[in-house]
Image (cartoon, helix red, strand yellow):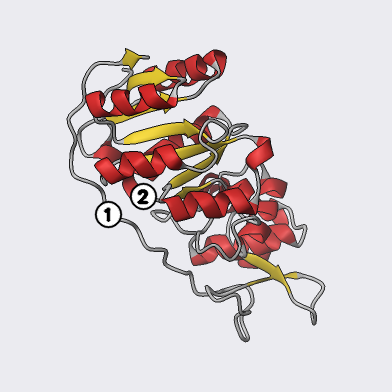
Amino acid sequence: MPNSVDPLTKGRPIGVVVVDPVPLFRDGLGALLARTTGVRLLGMTGNLHAAIVLCERTRPDVVLVDALLDPRCHLGSLLQTSDDSLAVLSVVREPLRTARYLNAAVTAGVQGIILRTADPTAFVDAIKRTFTDRRYLDPDLGVLANGLGIRPAVSARQPLSRREYQVLQLISDGLENSAIAKALFVSIETIRTHVKNILRKLHARDRAHAVAVAFRLGLLVVHRDSPFPTLSTADGQPVPGQPAMPPVPTPTVRGQPAPRRTTGPSTY
């Protein structure tokens, strides 16, 4: 049932406000949120000043803001100054797909950043994780985020297991499921399960995309003394003597804000 509760939010829907100047995109997001479990659309607007009034009235948990509408992140900063439990998710268009904008957003306190071209599933995931983890970065922005102190969106609640790391490396070496199963002395069905988990955790479309994402995130690296990808530790160093079985880094899971009141959806 749309807008019903979700275990991730501990019994209540996440209140969301959408701030975007393009009616078609805004309405599309609204329709997506209306049918999403665990999320409640509180209102939409395409105007910055109306957004402030709307947020004061509805007290949302997460506000989606079009980056071109607020390129210096003034709105996000202002909203959080008046309500520090509110989380801002910036929706980035191609002109602002730059390290400069990412730095400005992080400095302004924006908790989540997602590309406007992301698929609907990614938008829902970004909203929920911006709310629960207080940190989300679109995986496709990982390279631009280097040195900014933020990590791409590999789920902090679901890091890859040791075996999944091992399977991921063998996939990057070009092995098919049958060959991986033989190398690891397990069944093909077990490998298929590991592959499904890897794709889900890395938000990848297929095996090739998973490998590409792993390289962008630094989960796989190529060292000068080897032509093959090697797993790396949290500090980027190869695992001595056991490249296929690295220790799994444990990301920090941010705290969840206290429950908020929500009201009916509004449009400005």
| Mark 2: few/some/many CA within 10 Å (<14, 14-19, 20+) | many
The x and y percentages for residue 116 are 59, 32
Residue pictured at 75% horizontal, 76% vertical: 223
Give the camera-side residue of 149 and 215: 149
Query: Looking at the image, is 124 positioned above or below residue 136?
Result: above
The x and y percentages for residue 114 are 54, 40
- Badge 2 amino acid: Arg
The x and y percentages for residue 65 are 46, 32
Which image quarter holds the N terminus? top left
Which image quadrant for residue 18? top left
What mark, if any, has residue 71 been given in the picture?
none
Which image quarter holds the C terminus? top left
Question: Which circle's residue, 2 or 1, is located before the other in the chain?
Answer: 2
- Badge 1 amino acid: Gly
Residue pictured at 26% horizontal, 49% vertical: 256
Q: Name the residue under label 1.
A: 255
Q: Do we see residue 10 in this rendering?
A: yes
Please indicate whether residue 140 sits to the left or right of residue 7 in the image: right
| Mark 1: few/some/many CA within 10 Å (<14, 14-19, 20+) | few
Give the camera-side residue of 96 and 16: 96
Give the camera-side residue of 41 and 232: 41
Kindly state the secondary structure of the residue where label 2 is placed. Answer: loop
Which image quadrant for residue 225? bottom right
Kindly state the secondary structure of the residue where label 1 is placed. Answer: loop
Are the two marked residues, 2 and 1, in contact with CB atoms closer than 8 angstroms?
yes
Q: How far apart are marks 2 and 1 (CA)?
A: 8 Å
Q: Mark 2 points at which residue?
A: 134
Residue pictured at 21% horizontal, 20% vertical: 263
Query: Looking at the image, is 57 positioned above or below residue 113?
Result: above
The x and y percentages for residue 125 are 45, 38
In the picture as drawn, the residue positioned furthest to the right comes out as 227
